[in-house]
Image (cartoon, helix red, strand yellow):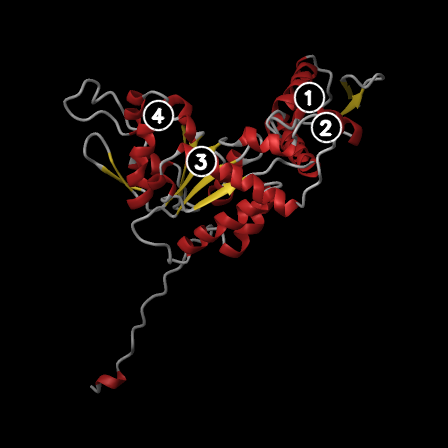
Amino acid sequence: MDLNELPVRRPRRRVESVAEPRPDGLASLLARKIVGQPSAVGKIVPYIQMFQAGLAPEGRPIGIFLLLGPTGTGKTRTVEALAEVLHGSAKNVLKVDCGEFQMEHEVAKLVGAPPGYLGHRETHPMLSQAKLASVASEKSNISIVLFDEIEKAAPSMTRLLLGVLDKATLRLGDNNTVNFEKTLIFLTSNLGSRAMMKHLSPGFGFEPPSVEDPKHTSDRLDQIAHSAARRQFTPEFMNRIDVSITYEPLGQESLQVILDQHLADLQTHILHRLGARGFRLHVPKESRLFLLKRGTSAEYGAREIKRTLHRHLTQPLSSMIAEGRIEPGGSVHAELSGDKAELLLRAA
């Protein structure tokens, strides 16, 4: 038989997971969830795109991001939103609260005690390969690790992370090696936030503060945050970070959008948890302004919104449900009192 007549077997084309978020849609999905910080989306998405395209550098994490800025501006929310987009749940994050590692000996919890030391078998390392795999999902094989408030950790933690940030490897106490090549690493910090707020609100004086160009203000805040980070961390640690992002205080429009998102989440929670006993919650504009005034501030940003909704809406609604004052399928209106000092709930 002529060899030219034999059928040619072409290699099968590898099919990517259908559930993996498309790179061109990732930015728009994140932009809907992260309010008032467009630069964060623009700086994080390219690293995920490089990994999905197979062009990410070998032997390093997918991306290492230092998120700077005042509290309540959306740093932790960015990480949760990314987990929602990639995995479908904000819980798919391996979070390390660095406030729990302020003492040098506590850092050993991350890697576990070595053989021969007291508590070797009882100490389970927080940064194991199994823990990384547990925060991945069928939708995406990317693991997200968050070191929250990294400036509070003991210096030995940053030294421990040097190998992770540079070579994507971590040696545990039992000599097993953890691979971080399919990992996004986020470090959040409030360094410089006080100086940033002082720059935005200089305080009392005989002359009102001059109105700066937004671009100049943004550059100045970025300079303040990065100067504080360079004073806190060693040069070799800062050089291993891919991108530093400075989060600016949220404006009134952004805070209103965040409040609307929380109210929508509360409505979804009511319908999901109560099922046939669910009801509709109506919060008019003036009631939203009431919640916004009590749930936001220049110092804490949007951090108090959840607590304010819990106090003024969730707790009173729970009492009404327990007392049988809300009909299944009915509605509840949140209205201001006559003196506009409190929020009153009325079942319709």
Circle 1 Cα neighbour tier, 10 Å, few/some/many (<14 / 14–19 / ≥20): many
Q: Which mark is drawn over residue 281?
A: 2
What amino acid is found at the position of numbered circle 1 in the picture? Leu
Residue 238 makes an appearance in the image: yes
Q: Nearer the viewer, mark 4 or mark 2?
A: 4
- The number of numbered discs placed on residues in the rendered structure image is 4
- Amino acid carrying label 2: it is Leu
Q: Secondary structure at mark 3?
A: helix
Q: Secondary structure at mark 2?
A: strand
Disc 4: which residue: 154
Mark nearest the camera among 3 and 2 is: 3
- Give the farthest residue toward the left: 116
Please identify the quarter of the rendering in which residue 278 is found: top right
Q: CA distance from mark 4 to mark 1?
A: 40 Å
Q: Of all residues shown, which one is farthest toward the right? A: 338
Q: Which residue in the protein does label 3 denote?
A: 229
